């Protein structure tokens, strides 16, 4: 089952398509790998808007806590939205903000780790709230500086 899902996902991702079709392709990938794309799309759009407008409280509300972030080159555990807001500029650096807000929805990468924004600076994923995973809480699960091994931004 998993190999068939991966093959179908690859066929969808690799097919040449227009931007609206690419958005459908991203949504199809989310549906196939993570679950209902609508929940993910809401969080992705809200995250990009909050980061673009420097809405620290808005971003903080979208994070799953506790979250480990890098501040000044050191890993730090942030346990609450208030602590996140207090350190927002050190957590969501200009480079991370640029990576999160650049590109379109159709440029997102989806895998079993979630939805990647930028080159991995931010990841969004869901946690099942019931045994059947019918209800999912979608949040920002990773915020990290760009890896020096990542290709340069366009």
Image (tube, rainbow, N blue to C red):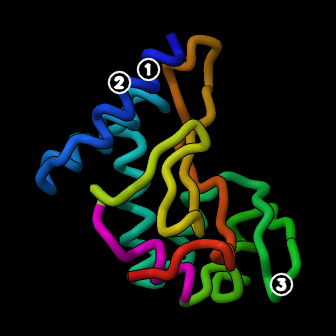
Of the pair 133 and 98, the residue shown nearer to us: 98
Q: Point out the frontmost of discs 1 and 3.
A: 1
Q: The C terminus appears in which quarter of the rendering?
A: bottom left
The location of residue 94, given as percent across then percent down, is 55, 90
At x 30%, y 33%, the residue is 28
At x 64%, y 88%, the residue is 89
Per the image, the residue denoted by label 3 is: 73
Confirm whether residue 85 shows in the render: no
The location of residue 123, given as percent across then percent down, is 57, 56
Look at the magenta stretch and give its main secondary structure.
helix
Q: Is residue 73 above or below residue 16?
A: below
Mark 3 neighbour class, 10 Å CA radius: few under 14, some 14 to 19, many 20 or more = few
Dot 3: what SS?
loop
At x 42%, y 44%, the residue is 40
Mark 1 neighbour class, 10 Å CA radius: few under 14, some 14 to 19, many 20 or more = few
- Indicate yes or no whether the magenta region holds residue 94: no
C-alpha distance separating marks 2 and 3: 40 Å
Q: In which quarter of the image is residue 104?
A: bottom left
> Residue 8, labelled with which disc?
2
Q: In this view, does 112 lie to the left or right of 50?
A: right
The location of residue 22, given as percent across then percent down, is 21, 49
- Marks 1 and 3, the one that precedes in the sequence: 1
C-alpha distance separating marks 1 and 2: 5 Å
Q: Is residue 141 above or below residue 138?
A: below
Q: Quadrant of residue 5?
A: top left
Dot 1: what SS?
helix
Residues at circles 1 and 2 in contact by the CB criterion of under 8 Å: yes
Per the image, the residue denoted by label 1 is: 5
Q: Quadrant of residue 36?
A: top left
Q: Over which residues does the magenta segment extend?
A: 95-104
The location of residue 145, given as percent across then percent down, is 67, 76
Q: Is residue 94 above or below residue 48?
A: below
């Amino acid at each position: 089952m998993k190999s068939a899902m991966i093959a179908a996902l690859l066929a969808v991702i690799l097919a040449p398509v227009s931007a609206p079709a690419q958005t459908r392709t991203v949504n199809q990938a989310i549906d196939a790998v993570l679950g209902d794309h609508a929940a993910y799309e809401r969080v992705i759009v809200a995250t990009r808007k909050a980061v673009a407008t420097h809405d620290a409280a808005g971003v903080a509300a979208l994070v799953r806590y506790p979250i480990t972030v890098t501040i000044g080159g050191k890993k730090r555990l942030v346990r609450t939205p208030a602590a996140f807001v207090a350190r927002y500029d050190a957590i969501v650096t200009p480079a991370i903000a640029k990576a999160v807000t650049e590109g379109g929805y159709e440029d997102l990468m989806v895998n079993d780790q979630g939805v990647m924004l930028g080159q991995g600076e931010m990841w969004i994923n869901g946690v099942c709230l019931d045994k059947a995973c019918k209800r999912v809480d979608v949040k920002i699960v990773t915020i990290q500086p760009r890896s020096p091994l990542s290709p340069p931004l366009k």
